[in-house]
Amino acid sequence: MPETPAVGRRERKKAATRQAIADAALELFLEHGYERVSVRDVAEKADVSTTTLFAHFPGKEALVFDREAEVEASLTAAVRERPPGQDVVEALRAHALTSWTRMASDPRRDRFTELVDGTPALREYWERMWMRHASALGAVIARELGREADDLACAALARFVLEVPALAASGHDPRAAVEAVFDLLTHGWQASQQP
């Protein structure tokens, strides 16, 4: 089994700086509102230059969605790196249960959601980002199943799966909500579920 290379000091320092910038940005945005905080304010709070900030983030909106690349990578890895014999939906269920139920319990989640929903630029960025994630996930699912990259069923599955965090967060028991949604994906809509 190949060994995972150790993360070097330089990479750790870059990651720590990036995290400090993201943490400073979120704190300021939640406290003062997205529109009232400048990139310079964030850089000052994180004790970095604006040049350093832009070396880590392409723009102001990206400061809010600092885990964008990590989220997409973990989604596609859940499908690509699933254990032999595990079906795609079950791999995505396992991913959702470990990743998204934890997000639903974050004490800042409601304030973060209000920030995004109440800021048109962030809402638009989020929608574009989520569509990129859906496209990447749909393509990986199609590749894993030996289908064309633009397979409609794979694209639909990806989009539905990406709605799970919002559905899970709307209830009192995120874990049960994730299970219910994935049960629906696995078994389909049953007539007995109708009112």
Image (cartoon, rainbow, N blue to C red):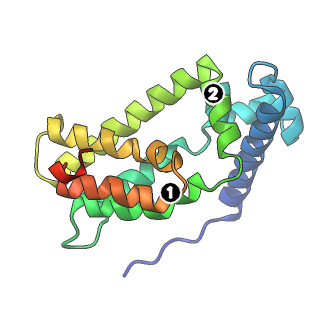
Question: Which residue is painted at 52% across and 30% down in the image?
Answer: 126
| Quarter of the figure that contains the N terminus | bottom left
Of residues 169 and 115, the one nearer the viewer is 169
Of residues 151 and 166, the one nearer the viewer is 166
Question: Which residue is painted at 60% across and 17% down in the image?
Answer: 120
Residue 20 vs residue 65: left or right? Answer: right
Q: Which residue is mark 1?
A: 174
Q: CA distance from mark 2 to mark 1?
A: 27 Å
Q: Quadrant of residue 114?
A: top right
Residue 175 vs residue 66: left or right? Answer: left
| Quarter of the figure that contains the C terminus | top left
Q: Is residue 63 visible?
A: yes
**Mark 2 or mark 1, earlier in chain:** 2
Decide: few, some or many residues near mark 1? Use Cα within 10 Å; few <14, some 14-19, many ≥20.
Answer: many
The secondary element bearing badge 2 is classed as helix
Question: Which residue is painted at 21% across and 64% down in the image?
Answer: 87
Decide: few, some or many residues near mark 2? Use Cα within 10 Å; few <14, some 14-19, many ≥20.
Answer: some
Amino acid of disc 2: Glu
Residue 63 lies, in percent from the top left, at 67, 34
Return the mark for residue 61.
Answer: 2
Of residues 172 and 26, the one nearer the viewer is 172
Q: Is residue 106 above or below residue 159?
A: below
Q: Is residue 2 above or below residue 140?
A: below
Residue 129 vs residue 192: left or right? Answer: right
Amino acid of disc 1: Pro
Question: Which residue is painted at 46% across and 78% down in the image?
Answer: 3
Residue 111 lies, in percent from the top left, at 70, 38
Q: Is residue 56 visible?
A: no
